[in-house]
Image (cartoon, grey):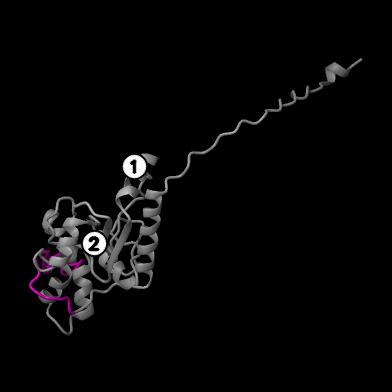
Amino acid sequence: MRSTAALALLALTASSVSGMPTPGNSKSVANLKSKVKNFIVLVMENRSLDNLLGGQTIKGLDNPINNGPFCNPLNVTNPKLGQACSQASDYNSVIDDPDHAVYGNNFEFFGSFEPDTSKTPKMQGFVQEQIRSYGSKANSTFLAKQVMNYYTEEQVSVLTALTQNFVTFNHWHSDIPGVSPASPLSGHTIRYSRIYRLTHPPSPPTLTASPCTPAPPPATATTPSQTAS
């Protein structure tokens, strides 16, 4: 990563960093401010990290080329029908936009339109949902490539240069599994709040002593034997 006055942050909608960073101490914050003048956030809609940056070989990215291949069955209830696995793409663009409505995300993540969201999603329904959405106009092999394949470093040379020289997220994550308007709003809000927290550590609490008033002694109970004459 080269030294620069501007820190570029490449972000993809439906991609984020999990967990809230712990603010640095005053010395580290001052060091950051002295070297970084601007944060530039580049958000690219309707593409996941696994698709656009799936072929980036930079260390630390949890993507198909580094940790894959990742596979999905053609049918979540009948695995015998076969599966599709991630590989380098052989197309210029995704013609059929994968479903990113709430119900579509439900099926892609959980394999059900009405899932039990208390369970951990297995991310096995992307291929079947793509086939359900566009099966009448294309074959299943072509549709599977659209949701499972990724671009190589050479195919997205500008994004490769940004990834190698600046900063990007390191794994696929969905802030809000739903329609487009909510995702950019969530992404910008969360990223701004994290940057602010990193550069504005909270002041330590000030403890002030206050005089203590002794508590009155407990009342002594009177028993019948003490009052008897």
Outermost residue to the bottom: 137
Is any part of residue 71 visible from this angle?
A: no
Q: Estimate how packed mark 2 is, as few (under 14), some (14 to 19) or many (20 or more) residues with alpha carbons within 10 Å.
A: some
- 183 on left or right of 86: right
**What stretch of residues is rendered in magenta?**
73-95
Position in image of residue 215 (x %, y %): 71, 26
Q: Estimate how packed mark 1 is, as few (under 14), some (14 to 19) or many (20 or more) residues with alpha carbons within 10 Å.
A: few
- Which quadrant holds residue 28? top left
Residue 84 inside the magenta-drawn segment: yes
Is any part of residue 10 visible from this angle?
A: yes
Along the line of sight, the residue nearer the viewer: 209 or 4: 4
Label 2 – label 1 distance at C-alpha: 38 Å
Q: Main secondary structure of the magenta part?
A: loop
- Which quadrant holds residue 52? bottom left
Say what amino acid the circle numbered 1 marks: Ser
Determine whether 36 is above or below 112 in the image: above
In the rendered image, the quadrant that contains the C terminus is top right
- 208 on left or right of 69: right
Q: In the drawing, what numbered circle is on residue 28? A: 1
Position in image of residue 45 (x %, y %): 28, 71
Q: Residue at x 42, y 48 (%)?
A: 200
Along the line of sight, the residue nearer the viewer: 146 or 134: 146
Among numbered discs 2 and 1, the one appearing first in the sequence: 1
Position in image of residue 24 (x %, y %): 36, 43
Say what amino acid the circle numbered 2 marks: Met
Q: Residue at x 8, y 66 (%)?
A: 154
Which element carries disc 1, helix, strand or loop? helix
Task: Tell me whether circle 2 and circle 1 mark residues in contact (CB < 8 Å).
Answer: no
Which element carries disc 2, helix, strand or loop? loop
Outermost residue to the top: 229
